Image (cartoon, rainbow, N blue to C red):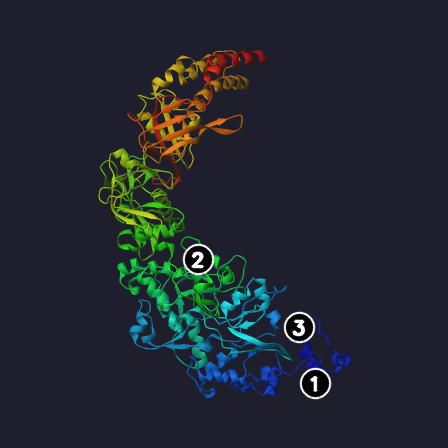
Amino acid sequence: MRKIKHYGLVIALSLTLGEVGTLTSCSEKDELMDEPSWLGNSIYDWLKDQGNYSYTMRLIDDLGQKQVLSQTGSKTLFVANDDVYNQFFQQNDWKVSGYDQLTDAQKKLLFNSSMVNNAYLIELLSSVSGPKPLKGQCMRRPTAASVFDSVSTMKPAEMPQTIFWKELRDAGQPIILLRDNTTKPMIHFLPVFMQNNKITDEDLAILTNGVSTSASDSWVNGKKLTDIDITCKNGYIHKVDGLPTAADNMAEIVHKHQNMSRFASLMDRFSAPYYDDGATKEYNALNNTQEKVYTLKYFSQTSNTKEYPGSEGGALDKDPSGQTVEATLAFDPGWNQYMYINTAGRDLHYDCGALLVPSNDALDYWWNHDGKALQDMYGSWENVPMNVLVKLLDINFIRSFIETVPSKFKNILDNTNKVPIGITRNHVDSCFMGCNGVVYLLNRVFTPSAYSSVSFPALVNENTMKVISKAIEKLEFEPYLNSMDSYYSFIIPSNTALLTYVDPCTYGSTTSVLYEFFWDEQKKALGAHRFLYDLATETKVEGDLADASDEQVRNRLNDILDNLIIVDSLKPEQKYYRTKGGSTLKIENVDKEGTMTVSAGLQIEQGKSVTVNTIYDMTKTGNGKSYVVDNMPLGSRKSLYAMLKEQSDTLFYHFYAKGDSANTLTKSMLGKSRGCLDYNCSLFDRYDYTAYMPTDASIKPYVDAGLLPTWNDFYKVKAELEAMEGFNASTAKGRTKRFKVLDIISSRIMNFVKYHIQDNSIYVGGKPVSGVKYETSALNPTNKRFFSVTVTADATQLTIEDQLGNKSHVITSGSHNLMGREYWIDNPGSDGYGENIYNASDVVLHTVDAPLFFEDLNKKGTWRAEVDAKIAELKDQN
């Protein structure tokens, strides 16, 4: 029976090992009567027989684990011999010089963190368990350790000097603190895993500080395995060349290293102690006490947000009192089981994080050189606001380790603009393996592009520009504005300016609505008060309006930012600039503080301008200049239709039918659907356009020659057809024939007008262009492409050449550079003031001295001849 019992254990062990395969090298007698000849003693007996594992034996005995490791179960144990322990007792962070000085907690930590509750060969240790084990994908796994194996006591003097620790610090009493309320997993770099994830020999050499030069070596918790796969009847033993203690988490590594103390203090700005009810109950039950237990957490986008013992990986953005914090790190460096949020369902087994930690000397050098702007503004590290400091820290928080090992350093991106930061192996001083990631000690600081970009003045001047700074962050304009591949001229509205925003969704109403944007410090959110507003007198009107919804706030601020960013430098000889959103700003007295002015469409219509008070030159290390204004540049109220109406005394009938708005352009080219403020041009989309309007005198000869019909001609022919048998509206066939005839007239008018509307807004005094082709709205039926015009423009003139080689010139002594904007409003609100800007199109209108043609009308003949021919053709068909 004894032999049968032992053989049952062997079978159980083989099943536990799973991937080992069929047991071999067993004789028939082995199979029926005894244990296999290759199977060793129990783990406990093996250690006893070796004679140089007395410290490990004492740990097992003192912790009551002899029975477990002698007879039952299947375990994997990582062991160090007595020589390793003796070296440890000579120098260690625990300040113990012998075994007898170890506390029960330290003994538990030493033993439990070196044991895995399953039997694993080294080859299988890198496989993720499951119905189909995933080989070479595991780098971390839980051990037998408990979170209560490493409970610490923190004294008031040790608590960070921040507001989040103040209450406990002022209480003057030590607290029971868990550095994290999840257990520390074992982290291992094993050959199959490294091969699978393309971790090279050189990578491992850097990660092990030169100790290992081959990716065929095996490492566990930062210790090299010297002998593996020692088979026992109840599991496996693997020897290590160092004490197999649980690896610290990244936050602990940073705090324990003398040359990382500056970075540790910066991280502490984002930490807080959270009362942990679950941990309190379990701790008191284990120790028969009545203590409160706290868990140290870091405000972060990916954090252990669930109470002990689980973890969720959500955002932690509230302090212990429930108030939303100013800024959060990319992830919690103290979360033992950290894993980034992913859609593949991968957990801690697959990956971990990494920290790039500049040394104290590197940070001090940076503070006095590249970071001098922060030093001048705030005086000390402690005074730098969290939302500013987080930009510097986040560039060092690497979410995925396996994607960014030294041979893949090019994958490490600046979080603020998503481009590589330029780190190389030469920047790494040393490495430290933690239970949740690897810490690289660096000899330099990588400056985030946020500190060099045109948005930096808004970031650091929160007293005067906080609203727009938060809009840049919340609406995700940071990657765009922080790009160092472009030059930006950024018009920054101050907090004061954002109290003067007139909602363009209400331009079509008798009474407009004024938005006063603000930053809600308590909710840590953007908002806007709304008031009825008389635009003519620029005064508020009595009447209550609810605050803008979150959606309205985002919608308006998106439009504001889009139309304050110019992707170009400003030049004294140029006055008109196209914005990122497609609208145009008129800027005069460039780079002269106090006299430099900015005008958008509304200011031009009102004969006003906005003065630039302060200019920030970010060109030395950054990507342009920033211009601060205390009033809002506001878009035009005028559609193309409205501008044409104003010019109707000088423009011919094709472009505005005097006294008959229904005939303007053509019904198919103008629309006024739900939410539209005015008649909008249906040819427009979310883009910018130029419209050329020939004078009456220049078009009249073509009308007199019968080459261009008018809308009067259209209606006269329509009346003729109505009186003509077979062409009136009394039958379906009659309506069809009538349409075919009238389409000849309307198509000539529409195609003529469409050819005078081109893509891109071109201004006299705008960005110079020379011989540039632009598509118009007139479609070539032959190749299904749009006919083009060729444009040349500079500071004083604009010339257009048509398809026939004819040239037309903008009449600069008359109406030109007329700025318009058309809005489409989505879901008009119940209060009649609209919900959101669904779409906006920008257009500039110029009067020109000659019409443009894409075909020779003389060769085509008169419209009347074409109409008569079509009527005759249709009659013959009868």
Q: Amino acid at mark 2?
A: Gly
Residue 174, by quadrant, is bottom left
Quadrant where the image shows the C terminus:
top right
Is residue 116 found left or right of 417 in the rendered image?
right
Residue at horizontal 52 percent and vertical 11 percent from the top: 725
Element type where label 3 sits in the image: helix
Q: Which residue is mark 2?
A: 422
Q: Nearer the viewer, mark 3 or mark 1?
A: 3
Side (left or right) of 596 relative to 68:
left
Q: Name which residue type carries label 1.
A: Arg
Q: Residue visible at 29% across and 25% down?
A: 814
Residue to which mark 1 is pinned:
2
Q: CA distance from mark 1 to mark 2?
A: 65 Å
Q: Which residue type does callout 3 highlight?
A: Leu
Q: Is residue 126 something that shows in the picture?
A: no
Q: Position of residue 826 (x, y in %)?
A: 40, 39
Q: Secondary structure at mark 2?
A: loop
Which of labels 1 and 2 is toward the front?
Answer: 2
Q: Tell whether label 2 touches label 3 (CB within 8 Å).
A: no
From the top left corner, tell me how far across and down residue 616 is, in percent.
Answer: 28, 49
As drawn, the residue found furthest toward the right would be 28
Label 3, label 2: how many angstroms apart (C-alpha)?
Answer: 49 Å
Task: Give x and y (percent) for residue 389.
Answer: 34, 60
**Depicted 342 relative to depicted 494: above or below:** below
